[in-house]
Amino acid sequence: MTPDDYYEAWKRQRTDVPAGFADRVMAAVGQHEQQQTGLALARAWLAALLSSRAARFGLCSLAVLVGLFRVLQVLGLFLAPSFGL
Amino acid sequence: MSEPSPAGRQPWVALVLSLLATGLGHVYCGRIGRGLAFFFAFLLVAPFTVLIAWFGHSTLALLALILSALGAVGVYLYAVVDAVRLAWAARGHYELKDYNRPLIYALYLLVGFATPLLAIHLLRANVFEAFFIPARSMVPSVLVGDHILVNKTAHPLRGLQRGEVIVLRAPDKRELTFVKRVIALSGDRVAVRKNEVFVNGKKLERERVSGDSLAFVRGQATGEVFHESNAGRRYLIMLGGGEKPLPDYPEATVPKGTCFVLGDNRDNSHDSREFGFVPLGDVLGFVQYVYLPAETWARFGVYQDG
C-alpha cells in the first residue's frame, strides 16, 4: 500500500458513521426540544401566576411572615424559656 | 411614554427577596456588593456576641449586646427598604448582570436564609442563653420574674468555682433547668446539718443582714437573710419561711466530675439535698447578666452577689 492508500483508508475510517448514529442524534434533538418546551411552559406558568395581584399579595404576605420570624429569631437571644423550681 | 423593558426591576420582587435573605434584593437589582455588605453586617451580631461572652463583664457590655441584636434587626429592615428603593429606580430599565440568573438566586437564598438560623442556634446552644425565673429557690440572689443571660463559654474552659451561680439540667427531671449555687466541687467533703453547711469539715460563716436594704425581696419570700461566705465569695441566703424543713445531708465526698449545689432560699429549694450530686455535663453555664430584673432596675446588668 502506498501512503495515499493509507491516507484514503484512514479518511474512510474517520467518515464512516457508526450504526444508529443519526437516530441517536435525532432522539437527542427531540429530547432537548421537549426540555425547552417544558422550561418555557414553566416560565409562562410562573409569569401568569405572578401577574395576578392576589398571587403577588400572597407572596408578599408570606415573605413578611418569614421576615417577622427572622426578626424574632435574632431577638430570641433574649427570649427565655422557664425554669423549674 | 416608553414601555418598561422586560428586564426592568419590580419593587415587590425586591421586597420578597430581601425579606427572605438579606441582600438578595440587591443582587436582583444589580448591586451585589452592597447586598453582600448588608448580609455580613446582619451576621456581625454573631461574632460580637462571642466577644462579649469571652471578654465583656460589665453592664456596658450587656447594653452593647442588646444594641447589637437591635442593630442586626435594623440592618435587616434597612436592607429591605433600600432594595425596594433601588428596584423602584430601575423599574423602567435595567441591564441584566451576569449574576441575574435563577441558579444564583437559589444559592443565595439557601445560604442567606440558612446561615443566620444556624448562627443564632449555635449562639444559643454554646454562647449565651436567656432564662426566665418563675420560682423562688434562689431568693434573695435571683428573684422570681428575673430574666437572666447564662454564659455557656466559660465553665468548660476554666471550670466551676465554689459560690458561683449556675444553671443546670435537673438530674431527676431532665426536661427542667434549675438555677442553683455551687457549694462544693469534686473531692470536697460536704454535709448539711440543720441548715448549717459544712465544706471539708468547716462550717460556712454566716452573718445576719438587716432587712432595710432588702425591702424589694420581702414581696417574694419571708425569712431571715444572711451573708454566707464560701471560697472567698460572699452572697445572700435566706433561712426560714419554708413550708417544711428540708432534710439534712450526711457528710459525703463529692465524686469526680460532679458538684454539690444548693438554692439560696434554703428552706424553699429542690437541690442536691434531694437530687444528689450534679454531673458537670449537666451544667449549662453561669449566670452572667440580669437583663430584665424583677422588682428594681438597680439590679440591671452584671449579676452580682449580695
Image (tube, coloured by chain):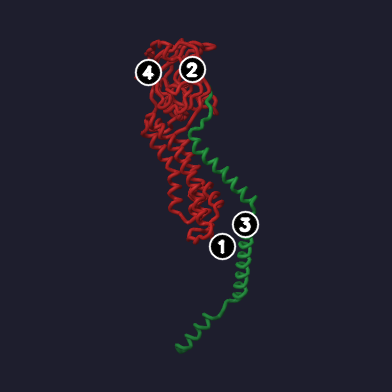
Left or right position of A17 against B48: right
Chain bearing tag 4 is: B
Q: Amino acid at mark 1?
A: Met
> Depth-wise, is mark 2 or mark 1 nearer the camera?
1
Q: Secondary structure at mark 4?
A: strand
Q: Are marks 4 and 1 on the same chain?
A: yes
Which residue, given by chain and number where applicable, does mark 3 sit on? Answer: A46
Q: Is residue A9 left or right of residue A36?
A: left
Under mark 2, the amino acid is Arg
Chain in red? Answer: B
Precedes in sequence: disc 4 or disc 2: 4
Q: Residues within 10 Å of mark 2 (few under 14, many from 20)?
A: some
Question: In the displayed structure, would residue B144 be above or below residue A38?
Answer: above
Closest to the observer: B114 or B248?
A: B114
Q: Where the N terminus of chain B falls, by quadrant?
A: bottom right
Neighbours of disc 1 within 10 Å: few (<14), some (14-19), many (20+): few
